[in-house]
Image (spheres, coloured by chain):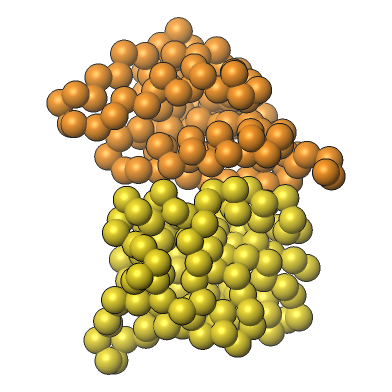
Chain colours: A yellow, B orange
Amino acid sequence: MKFGVLINEGPYQHQASDSAYLFCKAALAGGHEIQRVFFYHDGVNNSTRLTEPPQDDRNIVARWSKLAADHGVDLVVCVAAALRRGIKDENLAPGFRISGLGQLVESGIQADRLVVFGD
Amino acid sequence: MSAPKKFMFVNRKAPYGTVYALESLEVVLISAAFEQDVSLVFADDGVYQLKKGQQTKGIETKNFSPTYRALEGYDVEKLYVERESLEARGLAEEDLIVDVTVLGSAELGALMGEQDVVLSF
């Protein structure tokens, strides 16, 4: 099955990004396709390479970057939400790209299921 | 282009205090531009998004409630409000700034079951 994923919450504050990541890993391991992961609202904060968690904690941002590198998953950050929160191309982590909300709607159209992670 | 999909936006949060309502509205407008079959649901504190007479000057935040009245111009005309949420907050249909269809939670649930994409904000 082809899944689109939407993440509406930031890292560390909320479990949405962790759950979405684990969902993506499980889906890929099960032979499914992750058509796109779209980051919206505070979810855009998952994409900044300036994140530096303590060493004994998971690195949520780097984990997404690795997923993109290993599986070619398209990680898209909403431009309007990103600019509101100080996320720009120059502080974007590897594997992410900034684009418009049309990419989210397209995900809903192209994927068999769009799965929302957030409150 | 393939047949439009049924997109339902479920708005469950108060209009101010968090950015969900405003950013939900932004996706709604984009979905309409993609010519999808769009409907909106207002439930829980989300019913306050449609409350008449919003004044936001005191919190230095933009009052975006007039945008709901503009949705018609984007062919977004299916607005559903959950009856239980309205009643629990002492609100009635005439307190709202747009024409809506008020449905009970069971009817809304059935409608959700018919959708291709449900986005909850």
**Can see residue B121?**
yes
Write the residue at 64% across / 35% down.
B33
Write the residue at 71% across / 37% down.
B36
Q: Is residue B15 left or right of residue A52?
A: right
Question: Where is residue B92 drawn, in percent x and y?
Answer: 44, 13
Q: Residue furthest top?
A: B94
Q: Is residue A83 above or below residue A28?
A: above
Q: Is residue B17 left or right of residue B120?
A: left
Q: Work out whether residue A69 or residue A42 is closer to the camera in this orientation and state it.
A: A69
Question: Where is residue B35 drawn, in percent x and y?
Answer: 71, 34
Q: Work out whether residue A62 or residue A112 is closer to the camera in this orientation and state it.
A: A62
Q: Is residue A57 above or below residue B18?
A: below
Q: Work out whether residue B42 or residue B56 is closer to the camera in this orientation and state it.
A: B56
**Can see residue A118?**
no
Q: Work out whether residue A35 or residue A16 is closer to the camera in this orientation and state it.
A: A35
Write the residue at 58% across / 39% down.
B30
Q: Residue furthest front?
A: A90
Residue B2 falls in image quadrant: top right
Residue A33 falls in image quadrant: bottom right
Q: Residue furthest right?
A: B2
Q: Is residue A54 above or below residue B29?
A: below
Q: In the rendered view of the protein, which quadrant contains the N terminus of chain A? A: bottom right
